[in-house]
Image (tube, grey):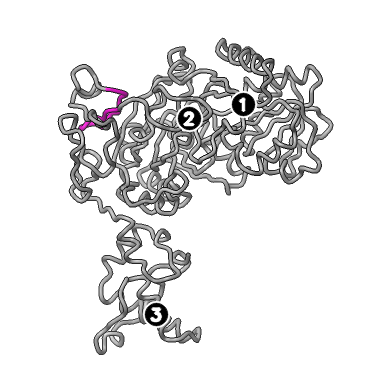
Amino acid sequence: MNLRPYQIAALHRVREAVRSGHRRIAMISPTGSGKTVMFSSVIRDAYARGNPCLVMAHRGELIDQTVEKLAAFDVPCGVIMGSDHRTDSTWPVQVATTQTLHRRMARRPPARVIVYDEAHHALAKSNKEILDAYPDAIVLGVTATPWRQGRLKLDTLFTASVLVATPAELMQQGYLCGYEAFAYAAPDTSHVRTVAGEFHQGELDAVCRDSAIIGNIVTEYATHARGRKAIVFPASVAHSRELVAAFRAVGINAAHLDANTPRSERREIIEKYRAGWIAALSSVAVLSEGFDVPDAEVCILARPTKSLGLHMQCIGRVLRPAQGKVRALIHDHGENLIRNGLPDEERDWSLGATSQLSIAKCRCTKCGYVCPSWTADGKCSKCGEQMVSMRCSACGKLKPRAAKFLGDADPCRCVAPADRSGPDQIEDSVRIALEEIRARRIAAGFAAEKLTLEDIRRIKDASSEDKAAEFKRLLAVTESKGYQRGWASHQYRAIFGVWPRFGEGVLDSVPAAREPFIPLARLRS
């Protein structure tokens, strides 16, 4: 298998780092640049010299991909992954999932050369323990995204790094395709907490599952990209399933998969997607790494994220060139392009880098098109309308999410969130902030983030008859279970935010509800 010129140059720099005495080297290789091919070449050379080798990855798909590439380099290998049928400890090259390898540390294979695929995961405690068990091995960590959200950066583990190429360079050379990017309506994250540098998962899920947002995601794809293979990145498994249902409702064949989807079923879904039977594939934590379908054209960012690494991994899935593919299309429904930047802009790729933006971006007030910087006349290159800056020209800071952008003439004046309007507002949509959700979940022992926005709307629109029927049902449960009467009142207050108070005869005239108003299993913390 022939290597590309930039791949040959990068591997030469890796060897120079080894000769300089470095034992742990990170190779930063953008999505679509052929990192598996490059490290397979490293393993082939080490194998030819009689060195035992180990390739580590955290997912089965990455293991399968590595085994396939090693075979193309005529390198036989054993697999250490659960009860995989390819297990064979006699081969000097072993490919292992980090989970299985950590469980079998007492029987770990020998290795003088270790490749850690998706090395941005290497700082996890169990993964560091594996690497520490090989103090004399040369470790090559390979990643497309070196930025980490936490306090620890990759420079605490690796002593040298090699940048293979930047996405911009690969686009210029034709190894990645160009793209068009559009920012659409996004959920209001102004009340969503940040935990360890990322949006709180439960709270983010609550705001992303707004039916208006879901409808907008499907509508924009159906209007501008129908018939083109799309990869959808949702906030949660439930959000993904709701999106798939919405796509199917308008005649677009879509499918969902996640980490719990059986591997055989996962393979079948992906093969149908490759063959074109599935138009939109939605997934949580499966397709953002190690997923290679070059003719996928549309990246739908259906969730906001503060993680530059996740942002770049998602977009990278659609930047591989393919026959008949001219440009990729990015549909951003989470303001991620504004928050995290465009895939080919200049960045700090060093091991200790943070995910700060380096250049301003602009968005068209009419069509939502996002471009890296101002055009000469300030007009959208797509439709000719005036562009709106997303970065303050006076202080350089991004303007707040919950603001109406006023342009450079008024760089820092923003209207209040309640008065927000403009291209990021969905007409006739109902937005319910997390504070309102929490206000309705005041009873101890319940978690606000367990409620969907549809639940909140039901609570908000409940009639007095609905409330009476639910309380009467709760009283019946109290009696059948032998609970104290106060249990029903507390459950009622947990749902509706007030204590039950009904006039004389009201409960007598209303039949008890047959089903819980809100399933208790969803409410429990």
**Label 1: which secondary element:** loop
Which one is in front, 225 or 153?
A: 153
Q: Label 1 belongs to which residue?
A: 159
User: Which of pointers 2 and 3 indicates the residue nearer the eye?
Assistant: 2
Q: Residue furthest bottom?
A: 504
- Residue at position x 64%, y 43% from top? 125
- Residue at position x 39%, y 23% from top? 345
Q: Could you say where residue 289 lies in the image, as x and y percent from the top left? A: 54, 34
Q: Could you say where residue 258 lies in the image, as x and y percent from the top left? A: 54, 45
Q: Look at the image and give the residue range highlighted in magenta.
A: 361-373
Q: Label 3 belongs to which residue?
A: 473
CA–CA distance between discs 2 and 3? 57 Å
Amino acid marked by disc 3 = Arg
Q: Could you say where residue 241 lies in the image, as x and y percent from the top left? A: 45, 49
**Label 3: which secondary element:** helix
Q: Label 2 belongs to which residue?
A: 353
